[in-house]
Image: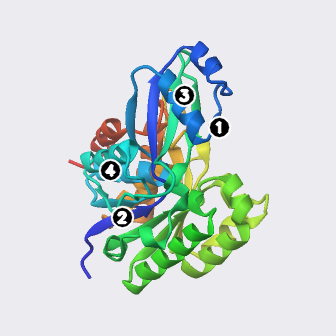
Amino acid sequence: MTATYDVTAVGNAIVDIVAQVEPSVVEQVDMPKGAMSLIDLPQSKAIYEKLGPTTESSGGSAGNTIAALAALGRKAAFIGRVRNDQFGEVYAHDMKAMGATFAATPRTDGEETGRCMVMVTPDADRTMATYLGTATDLGPEDLDEAAISGASVLYLEGYLWDKPAAKDAFRHAMKLAHESERRVALSLSDPFCVERHRDSFKEIIADSVDILFANEDELLSLTQSDDFEAALTTVSEQVAVVAITRSEKGATVVSGSVRVDIPADKVDALVDTTGAGDIFAAGFLNGLTTGQDPETCGKMGCAAASVVIQQLGARCEADLIERFKQAGWIA
């Protein structure tokens, strides 16, 4: 069956609101400098009022992956829960402006659209205040079944695996994908996320996941091991394709009987690792959905990650395109 999309992702729909601020603003809003804090809606609105000019864009882990894939020319769609409010409109518009499909209907009830205030001080430090809002309430009713059944790869963000409704949505999405003979990819997202959901992650990985993305810490946490090789063997016996990022060691990809260890790309300066895993996944899936071999997929992932870690934030479309052009991967 011909695919409508190369990748459809399901994840947290969070609007990133980025502002250049003086350290005094961070002190005024009482946020720990350089950290990410979860806040409620009144706090979010109070902080927003104290910011000057802002740049607002669609974010969230899977959203970052879809943005990069769309920039690289892939047909990509994103499913996430937003409200029919100002920031919900921002999220949908930004996704469409990037060339991706926002395959979701804004809600008319419940919490407001999620948002993350990113306060960047002159020392390049980033202080983040995140209101998750309606994003984490995603359920089966929020899924666009045609966008899932019509995608070569369904990409799921582990961060969403906290609430029962989201678990039901994931299971339904995976069922839809497999019924249409599509592949299911899962990103483990974060070691703390793995610790919270280890048993259920193991269950869906063994039963329903075809492509697994993780970093080394997440892999070791999943398998409760301190031996990378043993942990890699465990998951590669269960999943057709495993892609593990290893920071300065690069990445290891196992596809069936093929294992490839890919060195990290050289970088001039490490600025910010935010979004490195998201953009690695985009580079890797760009290769996978265009028929590249495991080694090339891994090289694309490492190249993409090397671009994003040399800048602030996870949006790197122009630099990403240039890097892929230099490598001869796109015209």
Q: Do tag 1 and tag 4 residues touch (Cβ < 8 Å)?
A: no
> Which label's residue is closer to the chain start, 3 or 2?
2
Q: Amino acid at mark 4?
A: Ala
On residue 7, which mark appears? 2
Q: Do tag 3 and tag 2 residues touch (Cβ < 8 Å)?
A: no
Whether residue 174 is visible here, answered yes or no, is yes
Quadrant where the image shows the N terminus: bottom left
Residue 321 x/y as whole percent: 30, 42
Residue drawn at (30%, 37%), measured in percent from left and top?
A: 318
Residue 35 x/y as whole percent: 65, 32
Q: Do tag 4 and tag 2 residues touch (Cβ < 8 Å)?
A: no
Is 39 rendered above or below residue 198?
above
In the visual, does 206 lie left or right of 224?
Answer: left
Residue 245 x/y as whole percent: 57, 52
Q: Do tag 1 and tag 2 residues touch (Cβ < 8 Å)?
A: no
Distance from the alpha carbon under mark 3 to that under mark 4: 23 Å
**Secondary element at tag 2:** strand
Is 195 rendered above or below residue 112?
below
Task: State which mark lies toward you, 1 or 2.
Answer: 1
Residue 329 x/y as whole percent: 29, 51
Work out whether residue 120 or residue 221 is closer to the camera in this orientation and state it. Answer: 120
> Which label's residue is closer to the chain start, 1 or 3?
1
On residue 47, which mark appears? 3
Distance from the alpha carbon under mark 1 to that under mark 2: 31 Å
Is 248 rendered above or below residue 127?
below
Whether residue 263 is visible here, answered yes or no, is no
Identify residue for label 1: 37
Distance from the alpha carbon under mark 3 to that under mark 2: 35 Å
